[in-house]
Image: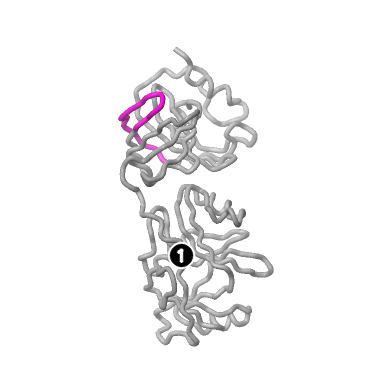
């Protein structure tokens, strides 16, 4: 019987990598475990591994498992891996095959509905991933992965920003609002999926932000502002988070979810917000040369387009 791990061993040096490298051929087996590993290698991807005949049959999935049956994702079949890889995590040294950080993203069991050389149909039962999927070979060596059951998440919201209505004076019921700086910059909505964002086409430095989200999906609302001579993306709202739309949630819930992300980097930060009193915020905006403040109703949902729930008050 051919050694299914021969190709795996040929790509690795046991003196240079912490990965498990069994010395003997796998004994076979009929288990049904699976693992998905988040792999920050040369490019971020997820490795799906299904137990089959004593090894883990593996695919690298650059965008992770598809959440919607309308969208297929590329799946590149790689060499079979040893069973010990079910729990492997750690740092593969730079310069080695697959060099980078690997973490276990999900584990569980699966049911096989079909398994052939060109098509693998399974039902995953994991902590973070579940459902019916089919992996199928396309022309050449590439494979695709398709979700066969219903969407596992809410659809992305329309990418249209909520805009404030201008008003000369702050609202009288100030306790019903939070007050933020009006930055005077350019509005930017940032959708993130599979560790990537289309916004990076115009702003390549956003690739680092998107990759830090891993498999977490999000749509961030913010503004490109110039602070201290540097361009900073200031985020002040969260429309979508980890598969769930937040547009119908009140401002307070969206703001709490945004702050929990802890967004802080060399090119981006979370905007400050102060509930209850416009006076000090307006004065600070005036002193910093900002155009004014934005009053946001605490109970307001996210309404694309011009809204009276957000008020721009000049400094």
Estimate the x, y position of residue 55 in percent, counting from the top left: 43, 24
For the N terminus, give its image quadrant.
top left
Determine the image quadrant of residue 162.
bottom left
**In terms of depth relative to the viewer, which is nearer, 292 or 101?**
292
> Which residues lie in the magenta part?
106-121
Residue that extends furthest to the front in the rendered view of this protein: 139
For the C terminus, give its image quadrant.
bottom right
Q: Residue at x 55, y 56 (%)?
A: 199
Q: Which residue is drawn at 38% across and 29% down?
A: 119
Q: Residue at x 51, y 22 (%)?
A: 22
Asked if residue 107 shows in the view, the reply is yes
Q: How crowded is mark 1: few (under 14 residues within 10 Å), some or many (20 or more)?
A: few
Residue that extends furthest to the right in the rendered view of this protein: 229
Estimate the x, y position of residue 286 in percent, counting from the top left: 60, 82
Q: Residue at x 58, y 79 (%)?
A: 291
Q: What colour scheme was applied to this rendering of the protein? A: one colour
Assign the magenta stretch its main secondary structure: strand
Asked if residue 252 shows in the view, the reply is no
- Compared to residue 232, the image places residue 21 above or below, namely above
- Compared to residue 202, the image places residue 174 above or below, namely below
Estimate the x, y position of residue 73 in percent, counting from the top left: 45, 41
Q: Is residue 114 magenta?
A: yes
Query: What residue does disc 1 label?
Result: 160
Q: What element carries label 1?
A: loop
Q: In this view, does 137 lie to the left or right of 149?
A: right
- Compared to residue 125, the image places residue 196 above or below, namely below
Estimate the x, y position of residue 152 in percent, counting from the top left: 34, 48
């Amino acid at each position: 019987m051919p050694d299914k791990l021969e190709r795996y061993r040929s790509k690795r040096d046991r003196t240079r990598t912490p990965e498990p490298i069994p010395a003997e051929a796998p004994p076979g087996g009929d288990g049904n475990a699976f693992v998905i590993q988040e792999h920050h290698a040369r490019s971020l991807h997820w490795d799906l591994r299904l137990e089959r005949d004593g090894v883990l049959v593996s695919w690298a999935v650059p965008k992770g498992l598809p959440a919607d049956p309308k969208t297929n994702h590329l799946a590149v079949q790689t060499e079979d891996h040893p069973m010990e890889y079910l729990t492997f995590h750690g740092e593969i040294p730079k310069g080695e095959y697959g060099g980078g950080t690997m973490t276990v993203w999900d584990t569980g069991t699966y049911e096989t509905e079909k398994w052939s050389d060109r098509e693998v149909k399974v039902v995953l039962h994991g902590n973070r991933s579940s459902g019916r999927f089919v992996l199928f070979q396309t022309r050449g060596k590439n494979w695709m992965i398709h979700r066969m059951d219903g969407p596992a998440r809410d659809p992305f919201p329309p990418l249209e920003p909520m805009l404030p209505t201008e008003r000369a004076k702050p609202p009288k019921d100030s306790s019903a609002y939070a007050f933020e700086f009006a930055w005077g910059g350019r509005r930017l909505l940032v959708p993130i999926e599979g560790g990537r964002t289309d916004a990076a086409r115009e702003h390549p430095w956003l690739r680092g932000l998107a990759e830090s989200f891993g498999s977490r999906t999000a749509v961030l609302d913010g503004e490109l502002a110039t602070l201290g001579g540097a361009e900073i993306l200031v985020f002040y709202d969260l429309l979508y988070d980890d598969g769930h739309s937040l547009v119908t949630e009140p401002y307070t819930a969206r703001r709490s979810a945004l702050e929990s992300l802890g967004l802080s980097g060399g090119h981006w930060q979370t905007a400050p917000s102060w509930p209850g009193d416009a006076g000090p915020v307006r004065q600070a905006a005036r002193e910093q040369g900002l155009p004014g403040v934005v009053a946001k109703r605490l109970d307001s949902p996210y309404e694309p387009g011009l809204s009276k729930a957000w008020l721009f008050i000049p400094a």
